[in-house]
Image: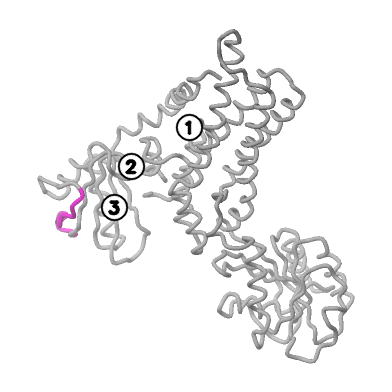
């Protein structure tokens, strides 16, 4: 890689995205709030004709930058209209936001008028795409926008907000700078060996690569926690019929979502619901009781329970301590060994037929009563510990939560690890340079400094319309 390689890469990046830049000549419009009845709705315009279109829409000749103007829009509605002059706007272009009454009819009528005046329909995520292409956001920060929109809990929101503020992009840019400095040294030593410059030794090369590898491994150590905060922890509640699975599900949901009776086999299929436990998004799966059955419908539910068991991030195995331990209980315990499972001895308010010491299992065991609430906070503590390993807010390393980012950091770390091995064997430095450059490019895909147009298109297609 040449010392000017990053600048050259940026030029080729712009060339790849030239079709997008041509499309940005259009002024786009979309409804930016959810459809349905609401007190206020927002329609957004972005592009070089945004101000001219707003003037025609409202009949107003003048709009002051960043002021709210009360306007009438034909005979259909009145609105507050705010003009934000480029480049100091979300997209980096002239932007106009129209706040009107939030009925679907009013919003659709205003949007239709904007189209008649020359605006083009915005594609999903096109406002944020323009912010990225205009340099207002790098790609990782742009992707954080959709995570903010989809955040299910306060912790998820905090993780996405930290990424939007640049936590991840700053860390990745710092690692890329270290790699760039190393690549420059390698290039100068290889291309100009007779010049009066400091020679890069294999020891120095090893020290630099080790430091970079350590930073990449730190990032990867946060991947599981980040994924859980973004997508949720999949928790399967399993056990024999009538041990209290549905009761536990209802307690965590805060409502009677699963039917609870004293008749075994009431739950004949998996019931899935989203919940929050200590600020962690959790996907609870209440399964059909696992037992032998001649009932065709119940057998299908039991098979789905077994599948939920194998796919879960965490399994809560519920046992009824008021009844003797059965062969089915023992089989479930054996199947749970070696997995990320938690054994719950339910109905501790009744006379126990066995104690947790009798289980002889290496799994964590908690005694609870769904009726009295005893032990439930201990379950919540354990779920929190296994999901985030402590307080996510106190973490120094930014969280990797996006699967695309995780894949790219893994690719970069693999290249650096291979470069380290070659350094240890004192192989030719031009071979080592190839791996370092590959890692540099992989990290550039996270921030958008080195990324294809197809990837950009795919990322923003996941956004909602109007964002």
Relative to residue 265, is residue 129 drawn left or right?
A: left
Secondary structure, mark 1, is loop
Residue name at image x 88 percent, y 79 percent:
358
Q: Position of residue 184 (x, y in %)?
A: 55, 22
Q: Position of residue 214 (x, y in %)?
A: 64, 41
CA distance separating discs 2 and 3: 15 Å
Q: Quadrant of residue 304?
A: bottom right
Q: How many marks?
A: 3
Q: Nearer the viewer, residue 233 or 266?
A: 233
- Tell which circle, 2 or 1, labels the residue nearer the N-terminal end: 2
Residue, disc 1: 449
CA distance separating discs 1 and 3: 31 Å
Q: Position of residue 109 (x, y in %)?
A: 25, 54
Q: Nearer the viewer, residue 320 or 6?
A: 6
CA distance separating discs 2 and 1: 18 Å
Residue, disc 3: 43
Q: Residues within 10 Å of mark 2 (few under 14, many from 20)?
A: many
Residue name at image x 30 percent, y 45 percent:
29
Q: Quadrant of residue 37?
A: bottom left
Q: Nearer the viewer, residue 451 or 19?
A: 451
Q: Residues within 10 Å of mark 1 (few under 14, many from 20)?
A: many
Image quarter in which the N terminus is found: top right
């Amino acid at each position: 890689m040449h010392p000017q390689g990053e600048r050259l890469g940026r030029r080729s990046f712009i060339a790849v995205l030239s079709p997008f830049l041509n499309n940005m000549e259009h002024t786009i419009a979309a409804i930016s709030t959810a459809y349905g009845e609401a007190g206020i709705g927002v329609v957004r315009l972005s592009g070089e004709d945004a101000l001219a279109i707003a003037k025609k829409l409202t009949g107003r000749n003048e709009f002051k930058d960043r002021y709210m103007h009360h306007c009438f829009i034909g005979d259909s509605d009145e609105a507050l209209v705010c003009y934000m002059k480029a480049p100091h706007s979300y997209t980096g272009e002239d932007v106009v936001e129209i706040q009107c009454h939030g009925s679907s009819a009013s919003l659709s009528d205003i949007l239709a008028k904007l189209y008649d005046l020359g605006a083009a329909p915005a594609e999903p995520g096109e406002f944020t795409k323009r912010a990225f292409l205009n340099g207002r956001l790098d790609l990782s920060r742009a992707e954080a926008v959709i995570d903010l929109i989809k955040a299910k809990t306060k912790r998820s929101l905090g993780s996405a907000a930290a990424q939007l503020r640049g936590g991840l992009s700053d860390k990745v840019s710092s690692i890329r700078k270290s790699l760039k400095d190393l690549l420059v040294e390698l290039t100068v030593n290889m291309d100009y060996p007779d010049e009066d410059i400091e020679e890069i030794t294999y020891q120095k090369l090893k020290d630099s690569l080790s430091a970079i590898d350590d930073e990449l491994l730190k990032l990867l150590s946060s991947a599981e926690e980040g994924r859980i905060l973004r997508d949720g922890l999949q928790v399967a509640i399993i056990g024999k019929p009538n041990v209290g699975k549905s009761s536990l599900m209802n307690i965590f949901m805060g409502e009677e979502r699963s039917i609870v009776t004293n008749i075994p086999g009431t739950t004949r299929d998996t019931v899935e619901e989203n919940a929050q436990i200590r600020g962690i998004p959790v996907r609870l799966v209440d399964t059909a009781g696992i037992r032998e059955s001649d009932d065709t419908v119940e057998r299908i539910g039991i098979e789905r329970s077994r599948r939920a068991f194998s796919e879960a991030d965490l399994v809560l195995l519920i046992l009824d301590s008021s009844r003797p331990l059965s062969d089915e209980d023992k089989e479930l315990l054996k199947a749970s060994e070696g997995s990320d499972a938690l054994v719950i001895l339910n109905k501790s308010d009744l006379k126990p037929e066995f104690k947790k010491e009798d289980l002889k299992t290496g799994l964590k065991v908690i005694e609870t009563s769904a009726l009295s609430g005893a032990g439930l906070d201990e379950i919540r503590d354990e779920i929190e510990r296994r999901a985030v390993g402590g307080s996510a807010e106190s973490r120094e390393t930014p969280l990797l939560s996006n699967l695309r980012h995780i894949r790219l950091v893994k690719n970069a770390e693999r290249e650096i690890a291979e470069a380290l091995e070659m350094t240890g064997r004192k192989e030719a430095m031009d071979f080592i340079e190839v791996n370092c450059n590959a890692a540099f490019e992989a990290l550039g895909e996270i921030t958008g400094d080195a990324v294809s147009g197809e990837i950009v298109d795919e990322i923003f297609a996941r956004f909602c319309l109007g964002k």
